[in-house]
Amino acid sequence: MWSAVTGRSVAGQVFLLQVVIVLLLVVSAVVAQVLQVQHDTDREAQNRSLAVAESFAHAPGTAAALRTSDPTAVLQPRAEAVRKATGVDFVVVMNTDGIRYTHPKPDRIGKKFVGTIGPALAGGTVTEHVNGTIGPLVQVVVPVKDAAGTVVGLVAAGITTAHVGGAADQQLPLLLAAAAAALVLATAGTALVSRRLLRQTHGLGPHEMTRMYEHHDAVLHAVREGVLIVGDDGRLLLANDEAHRLLDLPADAERRSVLELGLDEETAALLASGRVATDEVHLVKDRLLAINQRPTDLRGGPAGSVTTLRDSTELRALSGRAEVARERLNMLYDAGVGIGTSLDVSRTAEELAELAVPRFADFATVDLFDAVLHGEEPKPGTALRRAACSGIREDSPLYPVGERIRFVATSPQARSLTTGQSVLVPRLREAPGWRAQDVERTGKVLRYGIHSLITVPLRAGSLVLGVANFWRSQKPQPFDAEELALAEELVARAAVSIDNARRYTREHSMAVTLQRSLLPRTLPEQGALEIAYRYLPAQAGVGGDWFDVLPLSGARVALVVGDVVGHGLHAAATMGRLRTAVHNFSSLDLPPDELLGLLDELVGRIDQDETSADGAAAISGATCLYAVYDPVSRRCTLARAGHPPPAVVHPDGRVEFPEVPAGPPLGLGGLPFETAELELAEGSRLVLYTDGLVEDRQRDIDVGLGLLRDALSGAPDASPEETCRAVLDRLPARPDDDVALIVARTRVLGADRVAQWQVPSEPAAVSQVRSAVTRQLSDWGLEELVFTTELILSELVTNAIRYGRGPIAVRLLRDRTLICEVFDRSTTSPHLRYAASTDEGGRGLFLVAQMAEHWGTRYTPDGKVIWAEQPLP
């Protein structure tokens, strides 16, 4: 109890304050009474009347009652109660016109008040002395103001001076006794109240209590849940702002019964009952509220209940919006990973259309300029072509894929192409500009049920590549601004991929054009091999694979297949240089191993020439297989530099991969190349290929060679063309690497078309050779070539006898041309020169060059061969 009177806690301060107030009240009452007795009764009457009038005017509900439809019904009982309780003679309430609403005599109600009311209407107080029917009296008129300070009525109270004086004399002894008793009782009651307050406030000081209340009030009105506290009598004690909003409570809801707040019966009954409720859902007007309710007296608190309200409708709406946002983010993510998976313009457009249906639109179409489809920059003003179309159904009346479209100026697509801005057409039926595109077709579109459109330009920097169109049919709501923004985001991502594909298409076309210009367009004429070939560029880009067929002297034919490492223009250019080098080296009639050695040196020099600025060599790297077939001996000489081995299909259908020494790839240097020699029966098929045929990311080379063996053994009598077709049928449509394939079926130059003689190393043998050649040509029916052939062989044999070493041999081959060959063991090569007018010799080779279509020298392990070709008549 001592802490209650120390004044340190709220309870102590309240106790001291109440004691002081009680003392002040008692003293004031006694002093007032003494003064009333001692002072003019008139003054006492004035004060009492004023006190009664002011108290009634400011009493709760007085201003509100004046605004009701029947103020007398509410105020008359109160006025009479006050009059009787205070001892005044009358309490009159009137409106601003002075018409009475209350009076001790009911017949005076409704009549005009007798007295001055002007100053009171202005907000002041009027005190008057009036001689009434009951004697001299004092009356006071005071204004009644509402919360805004506006005077809404007047209150007048009056008392006769005689009544004042007599009452004061009679009340003074009683008042003194009552004051003493009140002081004792008030002090005791205050002590009890302070003690209980001390227990309830836990000894908190005023600052702590203020802070706690402020925090409690801030939390109560800031939470997004409604909070209600209802007393055990069913009256609402507290409602926070959220509860007012959710239940649409009136401003004066507190202290009113929950049954009178305009709530639905079920919800009002729950609040009034105070029963326990957990997440009960009630429909309150247009809201679904989840209600939780618990009693407040669980731990000794006051009886009643506390209720929390949560708006399930808004939560559901928020959840729906969050789901829509999540779906849109997922769509944008899928667009990032699903659009542009290939460097194909049409496929990228299809990916955009497929992604949008049905997640965003019911139908989606993509229209691109023709130039974009071919890798070029778009040309504004030209027609577009429908590159992709996707929909929930396949029978839509929209333009089909491949249709060439020229949009009219009033159409959304034309406006989008012209301005570079997206166009939203919420209702196609109300868009005459769109319907003017094709009246018949647009009518079918509307009858089909398509009713809304978004058109977005495909922009890549400053270029407009085309337009993407999104159509809606099933969902009745038209497209809105948020969906327009999503469409723009989708198309922006797709436009970058389409432009990348366009640029790749352009570069790929340039590289393919370069590569095809470097590859043989037609095969040269030759009779040793029946040849078919295929070349397939890689899906990822142009590579450096190449092949060639090179006729050689003596009816021989060289086959070459090579592969430059890498893809792109650099690989194609390197391939062209190597192919040109092979052409030049093959004209020297070099053996395959020597030719590969020269190619190896060339690739090494190319690497040195292309050394980067920092000194690191940009190694090109290449593989090559070079084979020479002789139809006379049926022998094929091969050498390879890091290249896959050839395949041989024998006439009986047996497939063999001959052992050809695998030299290092070109450009490494340091190791010699070796040759292998095969003897091929007539009708054998020699198959040369690059690694793209037998090796890719999904399988190794052994599996690929097995598949190639199966393809080659399928038809023993297949032609080279049929063999190429059978082999490539087992490949994917677009391989990962370039594929070059040559299939050559061997022919044999029979003995009836070959003639040869041994020639003694003496000048007299020349005439014998001429005679034998003449007879042979006559047997072949080539009498027209006798003279030139005799002249050529005379010169060649004479040179061999004079400058070469025996033994000497002569051979005639009747192929597409007539070939004359002279063999000797000397390695000295004859040179063509102009003889001076005084020289006795030096004109033989000049005559040979003039008479023959081609001539030359090739070296053999035993010497050399000088040959000359003449066209057949």
Image: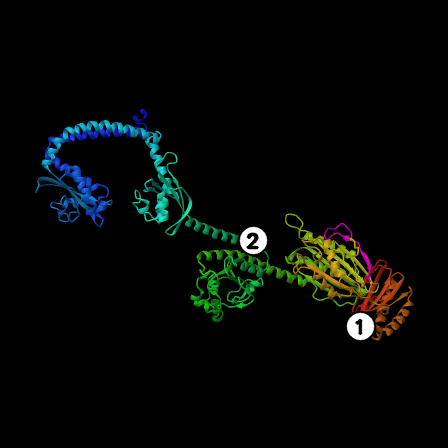
Type of amino acid under label 2:
Val
Quarter the C terminus occupies: bottom right
| Viewer-side residue, 106 vs 51 | 106
Task: Residue at 75%, 54% (x, y): give it.
Answer: 641
Q: Which of marks 1 and 2 is nearer the N terminus?
A: 2
> Where residue 769 sits: x, y (%)?
89, 69
Looking at the rendered structure, which numbered label has been put on residue 337?
2
> Where residue 826 sits: x, y (%)?
86, 59
Looking at the rendered structure, which numbered label has been put on residue 202?
none
Does 199 sit above or below residue 130? above
Residue that numbered label 1 is attached to: 872
Image check: 7 left or right of 803?
Answer: left
Looking at the rendered structure, the secondary structure element under dot 1 is: loop
| Viewer-side residue, 568 vs 226 | 226
Can residue 519 be found in the magenta stretch? no
Looking at the picture, the colour scheme in use is rainbow
Looking at the rendered structure, the secondary structure element under dot 2 is: helix
Which residues lie in the magenta part?
662-680
Does 150 sit above or below residue 791? above
Give the quarter of the image for residue 171: top left
The local crowd at label 1, few if under 14, some if 14 to 19, many if 20 or more residues have their Cα within 10 Å, is few
Q: Is residue 576 visible in the rendered structure shown here? A: no
Say which of marks 1 and 2 sits in front. 2
Type of amino acid under label 1:
Leu
